[in-house]
Amino acid sequence: MYNQLKNIAETNNFEFIYARRDFQNLNRGSADLEKIFLFLDPIQKNDQFDEYSNLLSTSYNGTFMLVKQSKFGDDYQVRFEETIRPLIEEKLNLITDSFGCSDLNIDSWNTTEIINLFNQNFDGVIVSYSISNEY
């Protein structure tokens, strides 16, 4: 899961940061307001076994954020139209499409809009996911 999201970030020129949320806030950001950041929180991994201890499936649960820095003075409508909507409609589709080309299956995918996150005033979306791989 980590590798999949890191590869997606690198392919699409997103800044990839894997850390706990309190460490993510230490990121200094970029002066480039067009730079997209993918902040991946630590991943919860759950393996399922049969009665003979054979691995049946692995599920990955967690959250990540896809965000851009914003101007502090913009109102919510401007932030939504200029940053949040394009991230949801364009960039998140790139991520979900890439899972279609892998052996990972999206079981659930929930998004929440965010504004003024961290000291850098990030706007974007938090994604809560459950993704599995059956063997």
Image (cartoon, helix red, strand yellow):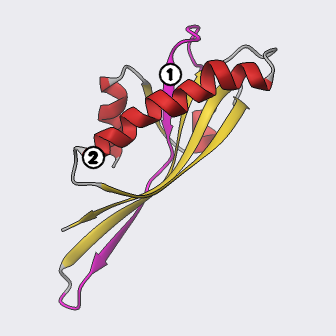
What residue is disc 1 on? Answer: 36
Number of marks in picture: 2
**Which quadrant would residue 125 be assigned to in this image?**
top right
Whether residue 69 can be seen here: no
Q: Position of residue 56 (x, y in %)?
A: 23, 75
In the visual, does 13 lie left or right of 112?
Answer: left
Q: Position of residue 40 (x, y in %)?
A: 48, 41
In the visual, does 8 lie left or right of 103?
Answer: right
Provide the residue span drawn in magenta.
28-52
Q: Position of residue 121 (x, y in %)?
A: 70, 23
What residue is disc 2 on? Answer: 100
List the single residue furthest toward the bottom: 51
Which is closer to the viewer, label 1 or label 2?
A: 2
Q: Is residue 57 above or below residue 13?
A: below
Q: Secondary structure at mark 2?
A: helix
Task: Identify which residue is drawn at 61% across, 22% down.
Answer: 83
Mark 1 and mark 2: span between their CA atoms?
A: 22 Å
Q: Position of residue 37 (x, y in %)?
A: 50, 26
Of residues 38 and 42, the one nearer the viewer is: 38
Task: Identify which residue is drawn at 22% across, 47% down.
Answer: 102
Task: Identify which residue is drawn at 22% across, 43% down.
Answer: 101
Of residues 83 and 30, the one nearer the viewer is: 83
